[in-house]
Amino acid sequence: MTTATQNCERCESPLETGDLRCSICGQISPADRLLADKLTVQILRCKGCGAATAYDIEHQAPSCTFCDSVVEIETVDDPMEQSAGYLPFTTGQDEARKAMRHWLSSLGWFRPSDLTTTARLEQLKPLWWVGWVFDAESQVSWAADSNAGSRRSAWAPHSGQVNMTFDDILVSASRGLSESEVSAIGPGCDLRSILDQPEGAQNATIEQFDLQRSQARQQIIAAIQNIAARRVEQNEIPGSHFRKTQVSIVLRKLITRRISLPAWVLAYRYKGRLYRMVISGQNTSYVTGTAPYSIVKIILVAMCVVAAFLVVFAVVAAS
Amino acid sequence: MADAASEEIASQVEISCQACGSTLLLDSNLRTTVCPYCASPSVIERPPSANRPAPSFVVGFVVDHDRAAEAVQNWISSTSIFARSDFKQAAPELTRGVYLPAYLYGAVADSSYFAKIGENYTETETYTTTDSKGNTVTRTRTVTKTEYRSLGGEHSTYIVDVVVTASAGVTNVALEAIEPFDLRALRRYEPSFISGWPAEDPSRSKDDCFQLSHDESVAKVEQMLHDFMPGDSHSGLRFETNLTQEVIDLVLLPVWSFAVRYAEDRPPVQILVNGQTGRVGGKVPISAIKVTTAVVIGLTVVGGFVLALASSH
């Protein structure tokens, strides 16, 4: 488990065990080595046998040529990410089932009429999927083209700088759920109720982070860039159409939590085919999934439209 | 400052081997030595000073001597056809593998910029031309034009991982030729890490190194700003950068250094090999004779072509 030990002196982001430098701004993490106050000459000796040690390419560490023991040196530690807490399931299987029926009946007229009655639940499985939640302060410099102020070209350039804070932003690390599924059910979770143990469901699949800390940080930074660009488009750039939105971010106080979030994953069968649904484990009104369309109804509507068009055409032609 | 730095660097120090007691004379810019009498590796620690801070980090050797020599040999034989023949045939001599002092620099770069942003648009224009029957006709076509709008603004970013040489024996250009080093393999400096290998102390003043770092940082900012500009094109980018919250740490980098003596009357060429990645860098001596021959052949071909064209008309 990686734990925050202290904060970076420069950007105040927490340093973690094994960080030699701050991953955000590059500031060196404090060392506890004493510096020489006068010229000293030393021969570094093996703690095992007392022979002199020298750096060895094969071990990529100082090692003793006599007894082959290796001297440990503080290196950049890049462990696999581990979940630090679990959000509990607060909805049961029955509620998930009810949410499925309700969702299927709410999809609209273009779906088969017998979808709700014929769809058969094949599987209902609780899943704890993994993600990061971060807080940060930042200064965002942006530049973009928008339609505001345009002259002969459809685009005009704009630029600006704005301070932005990020509170409890959820970034998915899940392999089991797609990006769109996560964005549909993620907001249904209450990020304040983090527990040490998975609670509220039996026989759940517990997803693990399958990437290292350094890759995780890159993903988080990429997510921050995306979120900042979207926010800038919503709130900062004048106009309504944008392109080439560029952001440059100076981050401070980036605090990241690694958590596992609950979801119900359902599979239902309709006329021989399997469809998938995902429901938030904390609020069953956050639902996403796939469902069949009624081909008959779509063809019917298309024919009606064509017929109406022909009638209008005929009327116009007659007049 | 420069005087003090050169004074620190110029002298030699006398140390005594802690294993056999022999007195060794050592260049004062070296951090390590191996006793010639008893082969004991010693590491020398000095009180840090402004121009000679204690190392913070070290990157260990990964590429051994044989691999480095092979990389240099391949590199020499793959140099451009204009390289001197005696250079291509010369055998590289290993001078040494050394932990080279360098500074790892970072800062916050605040820039104000100004540029002309080109936004494209299309216009339909009419033009006259002659058709296949020889009649003059008027036609239309769409052409892409660019209008230039000026854009000024502020840009802030972290600059990280700028590496500049702190050794007077290696220029920053020579170091850049074998960069990048994979800084994920950075280790916290411990004297035992460099034991048995030559390691230098900084021999450039910290002011010089700051200047090199600033220049590299500004070049990085310029690249970032070029990528930052909206529009279909841009021109006339001007910017002014202010570097604040600077951090600079001494790092020891693994470098194999080779010398190639290819002619009696020329100084040997220094070729460096990145001791972590095996990347080779150096300045290739160009053969004046080969270049002249190529130019003469090129001119002859062009001249002959022109003559042939002229005579055919």
Image: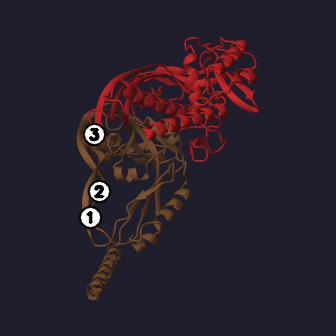
Using a 10 Å C-alpha cutoff, classify the residue at mark 1 as few (fewer than 14 neighbours), some (14 to 19) or many (20 or more). few
Which disc number belongs to residue B179?
Answer: none
Residue at the image position 35 percent from the left and 49 percent from the top:
B172
For marks 3 and 1, the one nearer the N-term is: 1
Q: Nearer the viewer, mark 3 or mark 1?
A: 1
Q: Secondary structure at mark 3?
A: helix
Whether the residues at callouts 3 and 1 have beta carbons within 8 Å, the answer is no
Amino acid under disc 2 = Thr
Amino acid under disc 1 = Val
| Residue under pointer 2 | B140
- Viewer-closest of A71 and A189: A189
Colour of the chain lettered B: brown
Picture quadrant of residue B224: top left
Q: Secondary structure at mark 1?
A: strand
Q: Secondary structure at mark 2?
A: strand
- Viewer-closest of A146 and A104: A104
Q: Is residue B238 above or below residue B70?
A: above
* Residue A129 shows in this picture: yes
| Residue under pointer 1 | B137
Q: Is residue B168 above or below residue A300?
A: below
Question: How far apart are the alpha carbons under marks 1 and 2?
Answer: 10 Å
- Viewer-closest of B53 and B17: B53
Colour of the chain lettered A: red
Amino acid under disc 3 = Asp
| Residue under pointer 3 | B207
Residue at the image position 62 percent from the left and 13 percent from the top:
A195
* Residue B238 shows in this picture: no
Residue at the image position 47 percent from the left and 31 percent from the top:
A221
Question: How far apart are the alpha carbons under marks 3 and 1?
Answer: 71 Å
Q: Is residue B281 above or below residue B90?
A: above
Residues behind callouts 2 and 3 on a single chain: yes
Tell me the quadrant of the picture where the C terminus of chain B can be found: bottom left
